[in-house]
Image: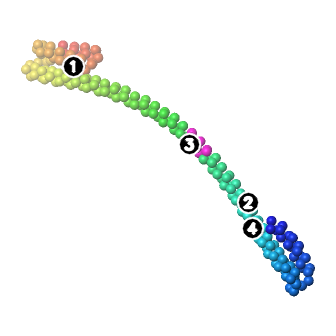
Amino acid sequence: MQLSSAMPLLALVVLGAVAPAASTNPLGQVLSLMDSLAAKITKQGEAEAKAYHDFVEWCDDAAKNSKYELKTAQDKSAKLDATIGKAAGDVEASSAKIEELAGSVSADDGELKAATEVRDKEFKDFASSESELMESIDAVTRAIGVLQREMKKNPASFAQIDTSNTNNLVNSLSAVVDAASLASADKRKLMALVQ
């Protein structure tokens, strides 16, 4: 804008240069001042043009930088969206796995409870059987003691022993055989031996 207003002044300066000897003539001095003013305005115009050019370059650089920053931010946003999607998928998969494992733990707890009940029942059965077997062992030990006493009294063969105490022995051995849960064939053989 200053450049266009300086043009008429510049025309006057050129006309003034044509005028003779400016130093003595007041009109020459005005023309001389106008020449210096035109030079000053031209210099300021050039400085403004350079500043404008620098400003345009800065705007272009800022626009390019903003464009690159925007593209970088969009790429980063896309990557983050993909990461969020993957994380959401991982959460769903993990939730499904947790539910599966919770079901498995529940089933295992049920199996453990059932196995514990079976073991408790088996332990009770064992304790009962052990008690019966201990009683049977005690009865056999007493029967052996009776046989040994009878053998000391009468050293004859086993077949020649007084049979009055034998009934007690047979009853004791029957209890032992029943408690030991022997097969019926084994029971008959043992009872035939004693009788």
Quickly name the residue at label 4: 51
**Measured along the vertical axis of the image, is residue 1 above or below residue 35?**
above
Give the spatial CA distance, label 4 vs label 2: 14 Å
- Of the pair 63 and 184, the residue shown nearer to us: 63
Q: Nearer the viewer, mark 2 or mark 1?
A: 2
Quickly name the residue at label 3: 87
Q: Nearer the viewer, mark 3 or mark 2?
A: 2
Which segment is the magenta one? Answer: 81-89
Q: Secondary structure at mark 1?
A: helix
- Of the pair 89 and 156, the residue shown nearer to us: 89
Colouring scheme applied when the structure was drawn? rainbow
Quickly name the residue at label 1: 176
**Amino acid type indicated by mark 1:** Val
Residue 164 shown left or right of residue 90 in the figure: left
Which of the 4 quarters of the picture holds residue 195? Answer: top left
**Amino acid type indicated by mark 4:** Ala
Quickly name the residue at label 2: 60
Give the spatial CA distance, label 2 vs label 1: 111 Å
Residue drawn 12% across and 13% down? 163
Q: Nearer the viewer, mark 4 or mark 3?
A: 4
Provide the major secondary structure of the magenta segment. helix
Percent position of residue 156, x then y: 11, 18
Q: Quadrant of the N terminus?
A: bottom right
Give the spatial CA distance, label 4 vs label 3: 52 Å
Task: Specify which label sits upstream in the sequence, 4 or 3.
Answer: 4
Magenta-span inclusion, residue 83:
yes
